Image (tube, grey):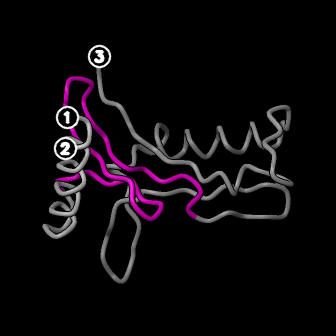
Amino acid sequence: MGNIRIVTISEDAIKEEGKINIEDKDLQLNLGKAVLDLMAVNIPMFRQKLKENKLSPITSHELKRGNSTYSNCIILAGEEHSYNETIYFFNKGILTRIDELDLDVIKEIKNKVDDLIKNRSL
């Protein structure tokens, strides 16, 4: 197979009046363009931007809809080969590889998993 890019898309940016209008051509075009720009056209792992006088990878993309711009609407959480086994943790709106987390967070996750195992074995 190949590499898989894992992204999150903010629902706030694609909803209008609490609903997602899948017939909205503006949304289709702009969301598709934003995803392709982040994931395919510019290959995020090689594309970089100047941030605080340092080059850093571009890992998010805005979504433009009409006169509105939603910053960080699409966030690149990671890139994995299709044969990899990797654990991700979703917390406070951010999806992160578990091996990139602080040890304290990993310990919290372990406690939650231990509780799940304990409750299922009852």
- Residue 37 percent coordinates (x, y): 54, 44
In three-dimensional space, the C-alpha distance between marks 1 and 3, rounded to whole angstroms, equals 37 Å
**Badge 2, how many Cα within 10 Å: few under 14, some, many 20+?**
few
- Residue nearest the observer in this picture, 23 or 94: 94
Q: Are marks 2 and 1 in contact (CB under 8 Å)?
A: yes
Q: Please name the amino acid that badge 2 sits on.
A: Lys
Residue positioned 44% across, 65% down in the render = 92
Q: Residue furthest front?
A: 122
What residue would you read off at disc 1? 121
Report whether 19 appears left or right of 116: right
Highlighted magenta segment, given as a residue range: 72-99
What residue would you read off at disc 3? 1
Above or below, 41 relative to 8: above
- Residue nearest the observer in this picture, 43 or 92: 92
**Badge 1, how many Cα within 10 Å: few under 14, some, many 20+?**
few
Label annotation for residue 118 = 2
In three-dimensional space, the C-alpha distance between marks 2 and 1, rounded to whole angstroms, equals 5 Å
Decide whether residue 121 is among the magenta residues.
no
Residue positioned 32% across, 54% down in the render = 96
Residue positioned 22% across, 48% down in the render = 113
Report whether 11 appears left or right of 103: right
In three-dimensional space, the C-alpha distance between marks 3 and 2, rounded to whole angstroms, equals 37 Å
- Residue 106 percent coordinates (x, y): 17, 60
Q: Nearer the viewer, mark 3 or mark 2?
A: 2
Could you tell me which secondary element the residue under label 2 belongs to? helix
- Residue nearest the observer in this picture, 32 or 11: 11
Quadrant location, the N terminus: top left
Q: Please name the amino acid that badge 3 sits on.
A: Met
Looking at the image, tell me whether mark 3 or mark 2 is earlier in sequence order: 3
Quadrant location, the C terminus: top left
